[in-house]
Image (tube, rainbow, N blue to C red):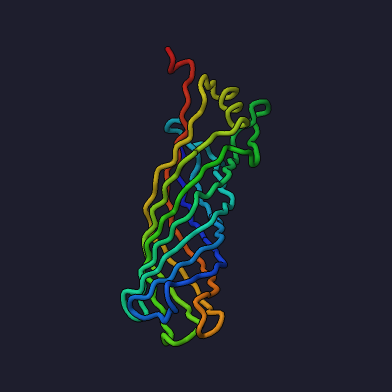
Amino acid sequence: MMKRYNLTAMLCAAILISGQALAEYKKGDLIVRVGGVAVDPNDDSNHLRLNSTALPGTRVYVDTGYSVSITGTWLFADHWGLEFLAAAPFKHDLDVRGLPDPVTGELLGRVRLGDIKHLPPTLSIQWYPVCIESWIQPYIGLGVNYTHFLSEHINSVAQSYFETVLDAKSRARLKLKNSWGLAGEVGINIAFGRESRWQFNAAIWYLDIDTDATIRFFTEAHRK
Protein backbone atom coordinates (compact mmCIF):
# COMPACT_ATOMS: atom_id res chain seq x y z
CA MET A 1 0.00 0.00 0.00
CA MET A 2 1.53 3.29 -1.05
CA LYS A 3 0.62 6.92 -0.87
CA ARG A 4 2.18 10.23 -1.79
CA TYR A 5 1.41 13.55 -0.13
CA ASN A 6 2.74 17.07 0.19
CA LEU A 7 3.23 18.18 3.78
CA THR A 8 3.55 21.92 4.21
CA ALA A 9 4.69 22.62 7.75
CA MET A 10 4.16 25.89 9.55
CA LEU A 11 6.30 26.32 12.65
CA CYS A 12 5.50 28.99 15.22
CA ALA A 13 7.73 29.90 18.14
CA ALA A 14 7.78 32.38 20.99
CA ILE A 15 11.28 32.22 22.43
CA LEU A 16 14.01 34.09 24.24
CA ILE A 17 17.30 34.71 22.50
CA SER A 18 20.74 35.76 23.63
CA GLY A 19 24.06 36.43 21.95
CA GLN A 20 27.61 36.20 23.26
CA ALA A 21 27.57 39.97 23.24
CA LEU A 22 24.96 42.68 22.72
CA ALA A 23 23.48 41.97 19.30
CA GLU A 24 23.86 45.03 17.11
CA TYR A 25 23.05 43.20 13.87
CA LYS A 26 26.52 43.93 12.57
CA LYS A 27 28.92 41.61 10.80
CA GLY A 28 30.22 38.95 13.20
CA ASP A 29 27.30 38.95 15.64
CA LEU A 30 25.96 35.59 16.85
CA ILE A 31 22.34 35.14 17.97
CA VAL A 32 21.03 31.98 19.64
CA ARG A 33 17.31 31.22 20.02
CA VAL A 34 15.77 28.49 22.17
CA GLY A 35 12.07 27.77 22.63
CA GLY A 36 8.94 25.78 21.93
CA VAL A 37 7.76 25.06 18.40
CA ALA A 38 4.61 23.63 16.84
CA VAL A 39 4.44 22.00 13.40
CA ASP A 40 0.94 22.50 11.99
CA PRO A 41 0.75 20.50 8.72
CA ASN A 42 -1.30 21.62 5.76
CA ASP A 43 -1.38 18.06 4.45
CA ASP A 44 -2.37 17.19 0.89
CA SER A 45 -2.58 13.46 0.21
CA ASN A 46 -3.04 11.49 -2.96
CA HIS A 47 -5.24 8.39 -2.92
CA LEU A 48 -3.77 5.34 -1.25
CA ARG A 49 -2.74 2.59 -3.62
CA LEU A 50 -2.98 -1.16 -3.06
CA ASN A 51 -0.09 -2.54 -5.11
CA SER A 52 -0.60 -0.38 -8.24
CA THR A 53 -4.36 0.15 -7.90
CA ALA A 54 -5.64 3.48 -6.52
CA LEU A 55 -8.34 3.37 -3.83
CA PRO A 56 -10.75 6.23 -4.70
CA GLY A 57 -11.89 8.39 -1.80
CA THR A 58 -8.92 7.58 0.41
CA ARG A 59 -6.50 10.08 1.91
CA VAL A 60 -4.18 10.54 4.89
CA TYR A 61 -4.27 13.21 7.61
CA VAL A 62 -1.29 14.39 9.67
CA ASP A 63 -1.94 16.09 13.02
CA THR A 64 0.02 18.86 14.76
CA GLY A 65 3.32 18.01 16.46
CA TYR A 66 5.22 19.86 19.20
CA SER A 67 8.85 20.01 20.21
CA VAL A 68 11.74 22.23 21.37
CA SER A 69 13.96 24.02 18.88
CA ILE A 70 17.30 25.81 18.88
CA THR A 71 18.51 28.12 16.14
CA GLY A 72 21.79 29.91 15.65
CA THR A 73 22.26 32.93 13.38
CA TRP A 74 25.69 34.23 12.35
CA LEU A 75 25.67 37.66 10.75
CA PHE A 76 28.17 37.41 7.91
CA ALA A 77 27.45 41.03 6.93
CA ASP A 78 25.49 43.99 8.32
CA HIS A 79 21.76 43.14 8.00
CA TRP A 80 22.49 39.62 6.66
CA GLY A 81 22.62 36.38 8.60
CA LEU A 82 23.02 32.64 8.08
CA GLU A 83 20.64 30.64 10.30
CA PHE A 84 20.58 26.94 11.17
CA LEU A 85 17.40 25.49 12.69
CA ALA A 86 17.54 22.27 14.73
CA ALA A 87 14.96 20.62 16.98
CA ALA A 88 14.14 17.56 19.02
CA PRO A 89 11.98 15.06 17.07
CA PHE A 90 8.40 16.04 16.29
CA LYS A 91 5.73 13.33 16.66
CA HIS A 92 2.62 13.25 14.43
CA ASP A 93 -0.40 10.95 14.55
CA LEU A 94 -1.62 9.72 11.14
CA ASP A 95 -5.27 9.08 10.24
CA VAL A 96 -6.69 7.58 7.06
CA ARG A 97 -10.13 8.07 5.50
CA GLY A 98 -12.06 6.16 2.86
CA LEU A 99 -11.07 2.52 3.43
CA PRO A 100 -13.94 0.04 2.90
CA ASP A 101 -15.72 -1.28 5.98
CA PRO A 102 -14.90 -5.02 6.30
CA VAL A 103 -18.57 -5.85 7.11
CA THR A 104 -20.74 -3.47 5.05
CA GLY A 105 -18.28 -2.44 2.33
CA GLU A 106 -19.15 1.23 2.88
CA LEU A 107 -16.32 3.76 3.10
CA LEU A 108 -15.07 4.45 6.61
CA GLY A 109 -14.51 7.89 8.06
CA ARG A 110 -11.23 8.88 9.72
CA VAL A 111 -9.53 6.04 11.57
CA ARG A 112 -6.09 5.90 13.17
CA LEU A 113 -3.28 4.59 10.97
CA GLY A 114 -0.25 5.09 13.20
CA ASP A 115 2.33 7.74 14.04
CA ILE A 116 5.69 9.04 12.86
CA LYS A 117 8.54 11.22 14.10
CA HIS A 118 10.70 13.56 12.06
CA LEU A 119 13.63 15.97 12.31
CA PRO A 120 13.56 19.10 10.09
CA PRO A 121 17.06 20.71 10.04
CA THR A 122 16.90 23.90 7.96
CA LEU A 123 19.54 26.32 6.67
CA SER A 124 18.40 29.85 5.72
CA ILE A 125 19.74 33.23 4.63
CA GLN A 126 18.13 36.03 6.68
CA TRP A 127 17.70 39.73 5.90
CA TYR A 128 17.23 42.33 8.66
CA PRO A 129 15.98 45.44 6.82
CA VAL A 130 15.82 48.09 9.57
CA CYS A 131 18.75 50.12 10.93
CA ILE A 132 21.17 48.08 13.02
CA GLU A 133 20.65 50.34 16.08
CA SER A 134 16.95 49.47 16.37
CA TRP A 135 15.86 47.32 19.35
CA ILE A 136 13.01 45.93 17.22
CA GLN A 137 14.34 43.81 14.36
CA PRO A 138 11.94 42.20 11.88
CA TYR A 139 13.46 39.78 9.39
CA ILE A 140 12.72 37.41 6.55
CA GLY A 141 14.58 34.30 5.45
CA LEU A 142 14.82 31.85 2.59
CA GLY A 143 16.56 28.51 2.63
CA VAL A 144 16.48 24.75 2.23
CA ASN A 145 15.01 22.07 4.48
CA TYR A 146 15.95 18.41 4.92
CA THR A 147 13.35 16.27 6.70
CA HIS A 148 14.42 12.95 8.19
CA PHE A 149 11.58 10.55 9.14
CA LEU A 150 12.05 8.01 11.91
CA SER A 151 10.11 5.79 14.34
CA GLU A 152 7.28 5.10 11.90
CA HIS A 153 4.63 2.96 13.61
CA ILE A 154 1.38 1.21 12.57
CA ASN A 155 -1.16 1.07 15.40
CA SER A 156 -3.23 -1.95 16.47
CA VAL A 157 -6.47 -0.79 14.77
CA ALA A 158 -4.76 -0.52 11.38
CA GLN A 159 -2.92 -3.81 11.92
CA SER A 160 -6.22 -5.58 12.67
CA TYR A 161 -7.73 -4.10 9.49
CA PHE A 162 -4.84 -5.33 7.35
CA GLU A 163 -5.16 -8.81 8.83
CA THR A 164 -8.97 -8.97 8.43
CA VAL A 165 -9.43 -7.33 5.03
CA LEU A 166 -6.08 -7.76 3.28
CA ASP A 167 -5.05 -11.13 4.77
CA ALA A 168 -1.86 -9.77 6.36
CA LYS A 169 0.19 -12.55 7.96
CA SER A 170 2.96 -10.35 9.37
CA ARG A 171 3.34 -7.10 11.22
CA ALA A 172 2.77 -4.15 8.87
CA ARG A 173 5.72 -1.78 8.50
CA LEU A 174 5.44 1.91 7.60
CA LYS A 175 8.30 3.76 5.90
CA LEU A 176 8.47 7.41 4.80
CA LYS A 177 11.06 8.69 2.35
CA ASN A 178 13.30 11.53 3.56
CA SER A 179 12.66 14.87 1.87
CA TRP A 180 14.46 17.97 0.55
CA GLY A 181 12.49 21.19 -0.01
CA LEU A 182 12.44 24.98 0.14
CA ALA A 183 11.96 26.89 3.38
CA GLY A 184 10.81 30.42 4.12
CA GLU A 185 10.41 32.37 7.35
CA VAL A 186 9.17 35.65 8.78
CA GLY A 187 10.10 36.74 12.29
CA ILE A 188 10.78 39.55 14.72
CA ASN A 189 13.24 40.10 17.58
CA ILE A 190 12.32 42.55 20.34
CA ALA A 191 15.00 43.47 22.89
CA PHE A 192 14.15 43.83 26.60
CA GLY A 193 15.70 47.30 26.50
CA ARG A 194 18.34 48.90 24.31
CA GLU A 195 21.26 47.49 26.32
CA SER A 196 19.78 44.03 26.96
CA ARG A 197 21.43 40.85 25.75
CA TRP A 198 18.04 39.09 26.03
CA GLN A 199 15.31 39.39 23.45
CA PHE A 200 11.88 38.03 22.66
CA ASN A 201 11.43 36.29 19.32
CA ALA A 202 8.39 35.12 17.38
CA ALA A 203 8.67 33.44 13.97
CA ILE A 204 6.79 31.43 11.40
CA TRP A 205 8.52 29.00 9.03
CA TYR A 206 7.10 27.47 5.87
CA LEU A 207 8.65 24.12 4.98
CA ASP A 208 7.76 22.34 1.75
CA ILE A 209 7.97 18.59 2.49
CA ASP A 210 7.15 16.04 -0.19
CA THR A 211 7.40 12.35 0.69
CA ASP A 212 6.31 8.86 -0.33
CA ALA A 213 4.96 6.52 2.35
CA THR A 214 4.89 2.76 1.94
CA ILE A 215 3.16 0.13 4.09
CA ARG A 216 4.42 -3.42 3.63
CA PHE A 217 3.28 -6.75 5.06
CA PHE A 218 3.29 -10.42 4.01
CA THR A 219 0.19 -12.30 2.90
CA GLU A 220 -0.32 -16.06 2.54
CA ALA A 221 0.37 -15.74 -1.20
CA HIS A 222 3.77 -14.12 -0.50
CA ARG A 223 4.72 -16.90 1.91
CA LYS A 224 4.20 -19.65 -0.65
Residue drawn at 33 percent across, 78 percent down = 27
Quadrant of the image containing the C terminus:
top left
Residue drawn at 59 percent across, 50 percent down = 63
In the image, is 160 to the left or to the right of 131? right
**Residue 186: x percent and y percent?**
48, 71
Q: Which residue lies furthest to the right in this view?
A: 104
In the image, is 215 to the left or to the right of 107? left
70 in relation to 17, above or below: above
71 in relation to 51, above or below: below
131 in relation to 19, above or below: below
Residue drawn at 60 percent across, 39 percent down = 98
Residue drawn at 57 percent across, 54 percent down = 66
Along the viewing direction, whichever of 21 and 167 lies nearer the viewer: 21
**Residue 163: x percent and y percent?**
57, 23
Q: Residue furthest front?
A: 20
| Quarter location, residue 167 | top right
